[in-house]
Amino acid sequence: MSTLEDIKGFLGVKRIAVVGVSRNPRDFTRILFQEFRKRGYDAVPVNPNLKEVDGLPCYASVTSLPQPVEGVLLMTKPSVTGEVVHDCAQAGVRRVWMYRATGAGGR
């Protein structure tokens, strides 16, 4: 369970990676990515299956980013969440938000 302070801390950073952003412009992950950008965040798309998102370079993993990020928003399937969290730890990212829309999520 997140506290209000945790949420404010995460949203207080300006450079975040959005892991799992979709190629589909109508997908929620893509809309949320665009909303972060509209609100002044330096949101960086991460998806190993894409080369670019909305004209921005898209990276295969958090560890492949050319500059560090302050936070990571995970919007991935539970089956890859552990690997992405491991990448975050390797990259020194301390703020990680695991988004879950519906279902049981990863355990």
Image: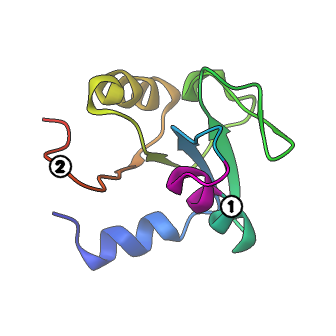
Estimate the x, y position of residue 76 in percent, counting from the top left.
40, 37
Count of numbered circles on the image: 2
Q: From the image, which quarter does the C terminus lie in?
A: top left
Q: Find disc 2 in the rendering and name its residue.
A: 103
Residue 12, above or below 100: below
Image disc number at residue 34: 1
| Image quarter of residue 80 | top left
Residue 17, above or below 84: below
Q: Residue drawn at (32%, 30%), measured in percent from left and top?
A: 81
| Direction bottom: furthest residue | 4
- Secondary structure under tag 1 reads helix
Estimate the x, y position of residue 94 in percent, counting from the top left.
41, 45
Image disc number at residue 64: none
Three-letter amino acid code of the residue under disc 1? Gln
Tell me which numbered mark, 2 or 1, is placed earlier along the sequence: 1
Main SS, magenta residues: helix
Three-letter amino acid code of the residue under disc 2? Gly
Which is more foreground, mark 2 or mark 1? 2
Estimate the x, y position of residue 42 in percent, counting from the top left.
72, 56
* Residue situated in front as seen by the camera: 106 or 3: 106
- Secondary structure under tag 2 reads loop
Q: Which residues are magenta?
A: 25-33
Q: Residue drawn at (36%, 70%), measured in percent from left and top?
A: 7
In the displayed structure image, the side of residue 91 where residue 84 appears, left or right: left
Asked whether residue 11 is drawn in magenta, I would say: no
| Direction right: furthest residue | 55
Whether label 2 touches label 1, CB < 8 Å? no
Q: From the image, which quarter does the N terminus lie in?
A: bottom left
Estimate the x, y position of residue 46 in percent, counting from the top left.
61, 34
Q: Residue drawn at (32%, 76%), measured in percent from left and top?
A: 5
Colour scheme of the rendered structure: rainbow
